[in-house]
Image (spheres, rainbow, N blue to C red):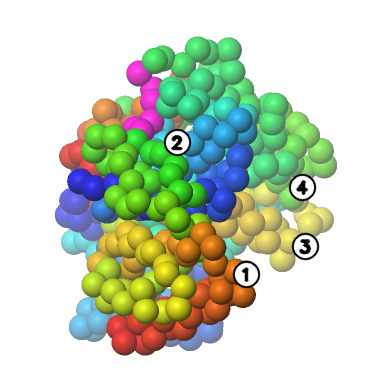
C-alpha cells in the first residue's frame, strides 16, 4: 500500500483537525498546538463519531460527541463524564504513519509513510478536489508553462484529491496563472463525467 | 437486519393535525406508504393499495405493517389534565433509528453538542444512576439520572440540576423525563430504512406561557444539533457486539438498551458483526 498525499502542510495549522482519505480509509488528520501531526482512523472508539468533527485542546484531540480526549500517543486521557477516572490504557484510537515533506502531508495505511515523489525544486501550490476518477485527471502537466507536479489521491470511485506543486522559482503571477488553469481543467474534467 | 420483528411494532408516521393538508407520501421499514384522510378518519396505504391499520395517539397518526402487532405502549402522564401537548414536527436524519434513540437516552453529550443549552463545561460529570430492564412490561428504565443544565427547556429560567427518568417502551421510542410534575419530552422514531429515519418529538409540558412556535423551535434546534452527530457515526447501524464500541459508566442506559434490543431480536437498524 503506497503513501498518499492528503493535503498541504500550510492548510492544517496548529490546533486544527481535518478529514482525509486514503484508499477507502476515512481519516482524521490533526495538528496539536505544539505542532505534532497525527493521522487516525476517523472514528472515536467510544461511540463511532467522526473525530474529524472534533476539536484540538493543547496536545489532545477531543471528540465532539462526548469530549473524550486522545493524546498524540493516541491514548484516551480524559473522559469528561468521569473527570476523576484515569481512562484504561486499552482505550485508544487507531493511528497511521504520517509525515510532512515538501510542504505536503503524507499518510500510509501500512508501514512507514514514504513520500512517493521527490519534491525538491518545487513549492506547494494548492489542493483541490475533482469530482472525477483518478484516470480522468491525467493531463495536468500541460496546464501551465511552468513545471508543475501533481499528486493524485483517489477518494472512492468518483473523486480525486489533487495536490499540485509548482517550480520553486515560479513568480506570484505564474502561481496565479497556474491556479486559474487548474480550476479551468477541473471544470473541463468534471464536465466530461 | 430483522425486519420481521420490526414489522409488528406501531410507528408514528404523521402529525395527526397535519392530515388536513392532504395526501402525503412517506416510507416505513423500506416500504413506500401514503397518508391521507382526516384526523377522525385517517388512511394509510401501501403503494399497491393495501389499507394499513391506524390509530391516533399522542397527537400523531400511528400505523403498522405487521399482521400481529404488539399493542402500542401508553404514556399515562401525557393524558394528565393541565398539560400543554406539543407535537414538534419532524426531523429527518440519515442514521439508524436505533442510534437516534440511543442518542436521546444519553446525557453525557449535552455539554459538547447542546453547549450552553442542555449542558456546559465544566459541568460534565455524570453521577451514578440506576438502570434496569423491567421484566413485567419488558421496558428499559433509567432512574435518578441527575445532570446540571443551563437551560433544560424553553420554560427553564436559568441553570438547574435536572433529575431525569428515561423509559424505552419500544425499540424506536424513548420517553424522558418523568418525575411527578415534570415536563415530558419524547421522541417517536419512524424507521424509513435501517439507515434513515424521521424523528417526531412530542412534549407534554406544564408551560402555558411560551408560544407554540417557540416551543417547537427549541426542540428543532436540539434535534438539529443531534443530527450533526448522528449522521457522522460509523458504522451507520448500531453495533450490538460489545467489542465494537467501548462504553464507560455514564453509558449504562446505552449498554442496557443494546442488550435489550439483542434479547428481543429487535435488530432492524443494528449491526451484529464487526465493521
The stretch in magenta equals A90-95
Mark whose residue sits in front, 2 or 4: 2
Q: Quadrant of residue A132?
A: bottom left
Determine whether the residue tagged by mark 3 lies in a helix, strand or loop: loop
Q: Mark 4 falls on what kind of element?
A: loop
To which residue does mark 4 refer? B155
Residue indicated by mark 1: A172
Q: Chain of mark 2?
A: A
> Local crowd at mark 1 within 10 Å, few (<14), some, or many (≥20)?
few
> Can you give x and y, in whole percent of width and height, for residue B117 in the image?
70, 43
- Identify the chain of the residue marked 1, using the numbered disc in the image: A
The residue at 57%/51% (across/down) is A10
Residue at figure coordinates x 20%, y 55% from the top left: B3
Q: Is residue B14 visible?
A: yes
| Residue where numbered disc 2 is placed | A38
Whether residue B145 sits left or right of residue B267 in the image: it is right
Q: Chain of mark 3?
A: B
Q: Position of residue B131 (x, y in %)?
A: 44, 24
Which mark, by number, is residue B211? 3
Q: Are marks 2 and 1 on the same chain?
A: yes
**Element carrying mark 2:** strand
Query: Magenta region, mostly helix, strand or loop?
Result: loop
Are the two marked residues, 3 and 4, in contact with CB atoms closer than 8 angstroms? no
Q: Quadrant of the C terminus of chain B?
A: top left
Q: Is residue A71 above or below residue A44?
A: above
Cα–Cα span, label 3 and label 4: 10 Å
Amino acid at each position: 500500500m503506497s503513501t498518499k498525499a492528503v493535503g498541504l502542510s500550510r492548510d492544517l495549522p496548529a490546533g486544527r483537525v481535518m478529514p482525509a482519505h486514503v484508499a477507502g480509509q476515512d481519516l482524521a488528520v490533526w495538528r496539536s498546538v505544539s505542532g505534532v501531526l497525527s493521522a487516525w482512523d476517523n472514528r472515536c472508539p467510544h461511540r463511532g463519531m467522526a473525530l474529524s468533527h472534533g476539536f484540538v485542546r493543547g496536545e489532545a484531540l477531543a471528540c465532539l460527541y462526548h469530549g473524550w480526549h486522545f493524546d498524540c500517543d493516541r491514548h484516551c486521557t480524559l473522559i469528561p463524564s468521569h473527570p476523576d477516572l484515569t481512562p484504561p490504557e486499552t482505550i485508544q484510537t487507531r493511528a497511521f504513519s504520517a509525515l510532512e515533506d515538501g510542504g505536503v502531508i503524507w499518510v500510509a495505511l501500512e508501514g512507514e509513510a514514504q513520500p512517493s515523489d521527490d519534491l525538491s525544486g518545487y513549492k506547494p501550490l494548492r489542493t483541490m478536489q475533482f469530482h472525477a476518477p483518478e484516470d480522468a485527471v491525467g493531463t495536468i502537466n500541460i496546464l501551465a508553462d511552468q513545471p508543475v507536479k501533481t499528486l493524485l489521491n483517489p477518494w472512492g470511485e468518483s473523486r480525486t484529491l489533487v495536490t499540485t506543486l509548482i517550480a520553486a522559482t515560479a513568480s506570484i503571477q505564474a502561481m496565479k496563472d497556474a491556479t486559474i488553469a487548474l480550476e479551468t481543467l477541473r471544470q473541463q474534467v468534471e464536465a466530461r463525467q | 437486519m430483522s425486519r420481521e420483528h420490526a414489522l409488528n411494532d406501531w410507528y408514528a408516521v404523521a402529525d395527526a393535525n397535519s392530515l388536513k393538508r392532504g395526501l402525503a407520501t412517506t416510507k416505513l421499514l423500506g416500504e413506500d406508504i401514503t397518508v391521507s384522510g382526516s384526523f377522525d378518519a385517517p388512511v394509510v396505504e401501501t403503494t399497491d393499495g393495501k389499507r394499513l391499520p391506524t390509530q391516533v395517539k399522542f397527537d400523531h397518526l400511528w400505523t403498522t405493517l405487521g399482521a400481529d402487532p404488539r399493542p402500542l405502549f401508553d404514556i399515562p402522564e401525557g393524558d394528565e389534565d393541565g398539560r400543554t401537548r406539543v407535537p414538534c414536527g419532524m426531523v429527518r436524519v440519515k442514521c439508524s433509528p436505533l442510534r437516534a434513540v440511543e442518542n436521546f437516552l444519553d446525557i453525557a453529550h449535552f455539554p459538547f453538542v447542546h453547549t450552553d443549552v442542555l449542558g456546559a463545561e465544566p459541568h460534565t460529570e455524570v453521577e451514578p444512576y440506576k438502570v434496569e430492564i423491567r421484566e413485567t412490561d419488558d421496558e428499559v428504565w433509567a432512574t435518578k439520572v441527575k445532570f446540571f443544565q443551563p437551560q433544560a427547556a424553553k420554560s427553564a429560567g436559568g441553570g438547574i440540576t435536572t433529575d431525569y427518568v428515561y423509559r424505552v417502551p419500544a425499540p424506536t421510542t424513548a420517553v424522558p423525563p418523568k418525575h411527578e410534575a415534570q415536563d415530558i419530552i419524547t421522541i417517536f422514531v419512524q424507521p424509513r430504512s435501517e439507515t434513515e429515519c424521521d424523528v417526531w418529538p412530542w412534549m407534554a409540558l406544564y408551560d402555558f406561557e411560551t408560544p407554540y412556535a417557540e416551543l417547537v423551535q427549541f426542540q428543532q434546534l436540539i434535534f438539529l444539533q443531534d443530527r450533526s452527530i448522528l449522521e457522522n457515526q460509523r458504522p451507520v447501524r448500531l453495533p450490538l457486539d460489545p467489542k465494537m464500541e467501548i462504553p464507560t459508566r455514564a453509558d449504562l442506559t446505552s449498554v442496557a438498551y443494546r442488550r435489550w434490543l439483542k434479547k428481543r431480536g429487535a435488530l432492524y437498524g443494528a449491526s451484529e458483526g464487526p465493521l
